[in-house]
Amino acid sequence: MMDKVAILAASTANPSMTIRQGSDIVKTYGRSDVSISVLYSLVMQTVFTSHMLLASVLVTCRSLALCSFLASRSLVFRAVAFPDRAVRTLWNSKTARRMRKKIEYEFWTFILGPGGNALFLMLFWPGWLLLGIAGWSLMAYLR
């Protein structure tokens, strides 16, 4: 039973006894292990920094793309709405209303002037519909 406790217990030997401080192995591998460790730490810091930089650039690019999309969409909507608003403003202006009123007066004077009323009656007389139906039925009856 005592043997098992001795195995589990910490070593009581002095570490300088196990590895000689002046040995060639410690000189050779000790320095290379330290330099590899420092190099590994430097590489990991560089990878982490570049990863963070890349992530921040990606977020910035996305934000910039969204802002430029929203700005261009707003400009397009305003550019499309501008001609409509301009036409409505011109159509409802005082000069345009006066001109439309003059053109309408000239048109109705020309059409309803001498003979204009008779022309309208001949073209749009409701009896033409009745005469057309009567003629069509007469042709169908005579066949």
Image: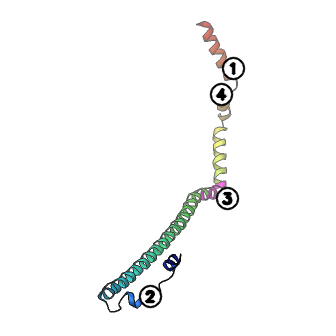
Could you tell me which secondary element the residue under label 1 belongs to? helix
Could you tell me which secondary element the residue under label 3 belongs to? helix
Which residue has dot 4 on it?
Answer: 122
Three-letter amino acid code of the residue under disc 1 = Leu
Is label 4 or label 1 in front?
1
- Of callouts 3 and 2, which one flags the residue occurring earlier in the amino acid sequence? 2
Q: Residue furthest bottom?
A: 22
Three-letter amino acid code of the residue under disc 4 = Met
The boundaries of the magenta stretch are: 85-97
Which circle marks residue 112 in the picture?
none
Q: Residues within 10 Å of mark 4 (few under 14, many from 20)?
A: few
Do callouts 4 and 1 mark residues in contact (Cβ within 8 Å)? no
Could you tell me which secondary element the residue under label 4 belongs to? helix
Q: CA distance from mark 2 to mark 1?
A: 130 Å
Depth order, front residue of 118/133: 133
Q: Is residue 93 magenta?
A: yes
Three-letter amino acid code of the residue under disc 2 = Ala
Q: Establish if 55 lies above or below 139.
A: below
Which residue has dot 3 on it?
Answer: 94
Q: Is residue 58 magenta?
A: no
